Every structure is written in structure tokens, then in C-alpha cells.
Amino acid sequence: MDAAEAQHHHMHGMAPPPDSSTASPEMMHHKMMMHMTFFWGTNAEILFRRWPGERSGMYALALIFIFVLAFIVEWLTHCRLIKEDSSGAAAGLIRTLMHTVRVGLAYLVMLAVMSFNVGVFLVAIGGHCVGFFLFGSRFFKRSEAVSAYVKL
């Protein structure tokens, strides 16, 4: 295959990856770390380069971090810090700020899941699940009928 065919077959105009004989050892190590299918293991890169690294403790900390991020996304989705009937510039700005933080955190969870690590995927789902159960399922909220009955 000549250079023109290689360029045509590789992402429409983007240069093909460097030949392994000319790539630096760091580049080859990084290239080997990129997974495009789900894998199970503690040796993963999540969100940042070389994080959490090769230590199991740091991997566990990364999983806790992703769980908490997903949990906070659900809390921000279902919390009502401002009354629904509130209007005005301050209420609008606070709602906008909360929405922006929620979407930003949701994107971080999505990017973490894109590491294709099964552990990250499971804790992200777990964080969303627990967060929704506590804040969105209304399991812990009393129904209107029960509340009205108790008030009598």
C-alpha cells in the first residue's frame, strides 16, 4: 500500500499513526493503553493521563470518585434548591449555574466510561442508580394522601 492509499484509508486526511520502529517508547506505551473494547483490570487511564496509574489503591480511589460524580449528577438533577414558582434574575442564574455544573459532571462521567474499563462502567451506573433511588424515585417521600391524613 502506498502513502496515498494509507492516507485515504486512515480518517480522511489525518496522518496514519507512526510506525512502531520510529515511535518513542512512551508513545508505544500510551498506544498500548488505549482500549476500544471493554476490559477488566486496574491498569487503566481514566479522565487524565497516567491516572490512576498502576496501583490498585489509586484505581479504587478513581472508582469511588466516578461513583460520587454520578451520584452528584443525580442529586443535581432531582434536587429543588429553588422553588418551582420562583422567578427573577437570581433564581434564573442559580438554575442555570446548577444545570451547567450538572451537565459538566455528566460529561466527566461519560468521558470516564469511555475509558472502556468495566469497573468504571459499573460504578458509574451504580452511582446513577443509588442517586436516582435516593433522590428521584420518591421512595422516601410521603404521598400527598398520607401527608394530608397525618395533618388532620
Image: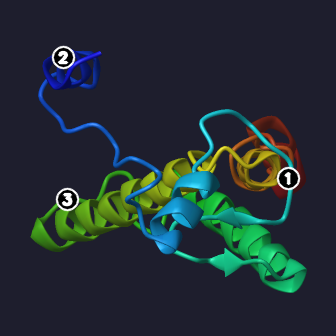
Q: What is the distance, in whole Å, between disc 2 and disc 1 at their CAs?
A: 58 Å
Instruction: Residue 25: give x, y in percent of width and height.
Output: 52, 71
Q: Is residue 131 above or below residue 1?
A: below
The residue located at (85%, 52%) in the rendering is 140
Mark 2 or mark 1, earlier in chain:
2
Q: Nearer the viewer, mark 3 or mark 2?
A: 2
Examine the rendering and report whether any part of residue 88 can be seen.
Answer: yes
Instruction: Residue 57: give x, y in percent of width and height.
Output: 87, 84
Q: Which residue is mark 2?
A: 8
Q: Nearer the viewer, mark 2 or mark 1?
A: 2
The type of residue carrying mark 1 is Phe
Q: Which residue is mark 3?
A: 87
> Dot 3: few (<14), some (14–19), or many (≥20) neighbours within 10 Å?
few
Horizontal arrangement in the rendering, residue 35 relative to residue 57 (left or right): left
Q: Secondary structure at mark 1?
A: loop
Query: Which image quadrant: the N terminus?
Result: top left
The residue located at (68%, 77%) in the rendering is 52
Examine the rendering and report whether any part of residue 78 can be seen.
Answer: no
Give whichever of 43, 128 is nearer the camera. 43
Q: Secondary structure at mark 2?
A: helix
Mark 3 or mark 2, earlier in chain:
2
User: Which circle marks residue 140 in the picture?
Assistant: 1
- Number of residue marks: 3
